[in-house]
Image: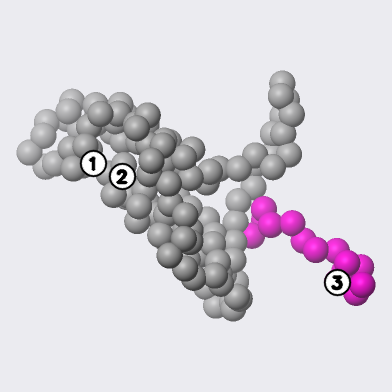
Amino acid sequence: MPVLFPSNTQELLDFSLHAIAMSRFSGYWVGMKVVIDVVEGSGTIYVGLDSPGIVLSELEAAPALSAQRRNIRAVDSMLPQEDRLYNHKLYAALAYVRANDLNKVTHGKSGAKIGISASGKSYKPRVPIRNLMS
């Protein structure tokens, strides 16, 4: 199950729309991890017809099953459910994430052997106080 982790009010809105679109495209349930600072915080958001800019045109790389056929049905036996889960839904979700650039590598070098993963509030860089004063 994909989980999105917004770090501010704008991402809360954008990731909500991405969660709906990814769920409909892949057939997965999409969750959101939201911390209290984001839910009870405030901020300025941009709302428009072009925001968040969901991309569906590059998703032809996803498997040929239609979105309706990716959903697991109760009448299926275990093998078709597993086949749909591992061979269709997973690749559809990955195609959606890649097309919409939801996983970002911000500081990377080719051939790196160690990586650090961060999401949500722990990812956002802090603004130094001296920059705020000038």
> What amino acid is found at the position of numbered circle 2 in the picture?
Phe
Query: Residue 60 versus residue 19: which sits nearer the camera?
Result: 60
Residue depicted at 47% across the width and 68% down the height? 48
Q: Secondary structure at mark 3?
A: helix
For residue 25, which numbered disc appears in the image? Answer: 2
Would you identify the image quadrant in which residue 90 lies? top left
The percent coordinates of residue 110 (x first, y second) are: 71, 24
> What amino acid is found at the position of numbered circle 1 in the picture?
Ala
Residue 133 visible, this angle: yes
Kindly check if marks 2 and 1 are in contact, taking CB atoms under 8 A apart as contact: yes
Start-end of magenta stretch: 121-134
Residue marked by disc 3 = 132
13 left or right of 92 in image: right
The percent coordinates of residue 51 (x first, y second) are: 48, 61
Q: CA distance from mark 1 to mark 3?
A: 48 Å
Residue 90 visible, this angle: no
Residue depicted at 72% across the width and 21% down the height? 111
Q: Looking at the image, tell me whether mark 1 or mark 3 is earlier in sequence order.
A: 1
Mark 3, other Cα within 10 Å: few <14 / some 14–19 / many ≥20: few
> What amino acid is found at the position of numbered circle 3 in the picture?
Leu
Q: Looking at the image, tell me whether mark 2 or mark 1 is earlier in sequence order.
A: 2
Queried whether the magenta region covers residue 125, the answer comes back as yes
Q: CA distance from mark 2 to mark 1?
A: 5 Å
Q: Quadrant of the C terminus?
A: bottom right
Q: Is residue 44 above or below residue 103?
A: below
Q: Is residue 54 above or below residue 49?
A: above
Residue marked by disc 1 = 67
Q: Quadrant of the N terminus?
A: top left
